[in-house]
Image (tube, coloured by chain):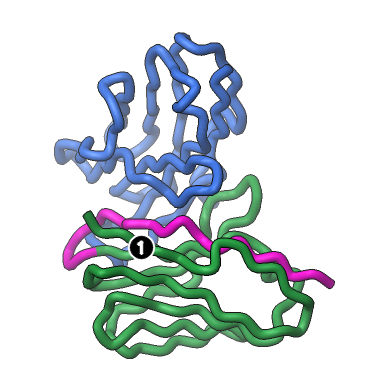
Amino acid sequence: TQLLEQSPQFLSIQEGENLTVYCNSSSVFSSLQWYRQEPGEGPVLLVTVVTGGEVKKLNRLTFQFGDARKDSSLHITAAQPGDTGLYLCAGSGAGSYQLTFGKGTKLSVIP
Amino acid sequence: GAGVSQSPSNKVTEKGKDVELRCDPISGHTALYWYRQRLGQGLEFLIYFQGNSAPDKSGLPSDRFSAERTGESVSTLTIQRTQQEDSAVYLCASSALGGGGGDEQFFGPGTRLTVL
């Protein structure tokens, strides 16, 4: 069974601070996705990474896929209250439609 | 419709009753997924439909759970004889191809089920 561990589970920071959240596994994934979920809504895809060592940027968000494709990180620069939400990572194996989700990091950005 | 829709948005039921949850995927999407999200947990895969292929039911937690899909449109998830442990948000997602991690899944807002 593939498991994804996310840390920290909860994070509360002041507006303007930087933060990094982590997604770790002992298994190799062919691709890994990051989602943000707001209360009462479904998750929304932020990015998909597929190559070991890959770095993708989405405005103030930087995503990195580990060289061994077992872990990933999400770094947010100068966090804004609009960044508040539950950040989920999800991995899939080669050619598989099944996503394995982590439990998420609940981020609160205080104005 | 612009996105995936689900109904009802909230459902409160008594233990032992049956419930039926509905999902309307994005038009033209061949793949449809059901997930369960318990409080403070990640998403747990339940079932996957792809076109006319036999569904992958490997994630259904018990035989009280079943799901149907009409062609490439509406899907219903039925939970019989509900238990308090079934309380969760049930999320539906659809994707254009269903072929793997690179195929984006679009999620509906979910149905929050509370079993008293």
Chain holding disc 1: A
A94 magenta-colored: yes
Q: Quadrant where the C terminus of chain A lies?
A: bottom right
Residue occupying the point 78% across, 76% down: A14
Tell me where residue A95 sits by quadrant.
bottom left
In this rendering, the answer to whether A24 lies above or below A64 is: above
Along the viewing direction, whichever of B100 and A68 lies nearer the viewer? A68
Which amino acid, mark 1? Answer: Leu
Quadrant where the image shows the N terminus of chain A: bottom left
Q: Colour of chain B?
A: blue
- Can you say whether A63 is above or below A24 in the image? below
Q: In this view, does B67 lie to the left or right of A60?
A: left
At which x and y percent is residue A76? 61, 82
Range of residues picked out in magenta: A93-111
- Chain shown in green: A
* Relative image position of residue A6 (x, y in whole percent): 45, 65
Q: Nearer the viewer, residue B14 or B107?
A: B14
Image x and y of residue B107, in percent? 47, 51
B4 relative to B63 in the view: left or right: right
Q: On the rendered structure, is B3 left or right of A10?
A: left
User: x%, y% of residue B111?
Assistant: 54, 34
Q: Mark 1 points at which residue?
A: A4
At horizontal 39% and vertical 74% (from top left) the residue drawn is A48
Question: Circle 1: is it few (<14), some (14-19), or many (20+) Cα within 10 Å?
Answer: many
**Above-or-below relation of A104 to B66:** below
- Measured along the vertical axis of the image, is residue B94 above or below residue A92? above
As drawn, which residue projects farthest toward the right?
A: A111
Front one among B48 and A1: A1
Q: Quadrant of residue A32?
A: bottom left
